[in-house]
Amino acid sequence: EIVMTQSPATLSVSPGERATLSCRASQSVRSHLAWYQQKPGQAPRLLIYGASTRATGIPARFSGSGSGTEFTLTISSLQSEDFAVYFCQHYNNWPPYAFGQGTKVEIK
Amino acid sequence: QVQLVESGGGVVQPGKSLRLSCTASGFTFNTYGMHWVRQAPGKGLEWVAVISYDGSEKYYADSVKGRFTISRDNPKNTLYLQMNSLRAEDTAVYYCAKDGYYYDSGNLGFHDYWGQGTLVTVSS
């Protein structure tokens, strides 16, 4: 079973700064990696799939990279609406489809 | 626009059963797989189950295998999750989610649209 590990658990960033979130898989998931954003009291929202493809309507400041076991989500210039929890998830060699434990992006 | 609306949550005693429903609109329901994902209070996301576009394939997380059953009624655009032998650790918000792959890809993967969730509380 593939385990997804995200770091850091919490990231403190000032508005306008760049945020870099990491996700590591315990074995290769090729490019079968998605990123989701979740705000308090809301359902998750798909940001990135295929490790680097932005979902419909997602702003260009969100970008994903990586393949195999190491992945990165970058938010180039944080806006107020970007403060949230971010989860990665693999969809290779399922089931199960494992999620990472999440990274909370908070205002510095 | 895609809409997914869950219902059926509530408070239930340990060992009892509950059936969740998810009504879909805004897309051709019978051409996409569907998932259930849950989130315990204050915790992360846990994938629960997936069903293929035609119901022929079903897969479950080990934590619910043998107790939960996923199903779908394509003419009614509705997804179900039958939950039996419920435990306190099943307490969570349950989300239904649409799979991102069209049926002819032969794949099941990420979740491109989610419902707002329904809360299931298992408590005596």
Image (cartoon, coloured by chain):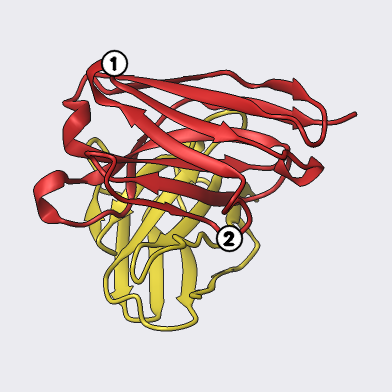
The quadrant where residue B54 appears: top left
The reply to whether discs 1 and 2 touch (Cβ–Cβ < 8 Å) is no
Q: x, y percentage for residue A64?
A: 31, 62
Is B76 situated above or below B37? above
**Closer to the camera, A72 or A79?**
A72
Q: Residue at x 82, y 28 (%)?
A: B13
Cα distance in 3D space between marks 1 and 2:
29 Å
What colour do you see for chain A? yellow
Left or right of residue B72: residue A99 = right
User: Pointer 2: what residue?
Assistant: B62
Q: x, y percentage for residue B108?
A: 27, 54
User: Pointer 1: what residue?
Assistant: B76
Q: x, y percentage for residue B52?
A: 28, 45
Q: Secondary structure at mark 1?
A: helix
Host chain of mark 2: B
Q: Secondary structure at mark 2?
A: loop
Of all chains in the rendering, the one displayed in red is: B
Left or right of residue A9: residue B25 = left
Host chain of mark 1: B
- In primary-sequence order, the first of circles 1 and 2 is 2
Q: Amino acid at mark 2?
A: Asp
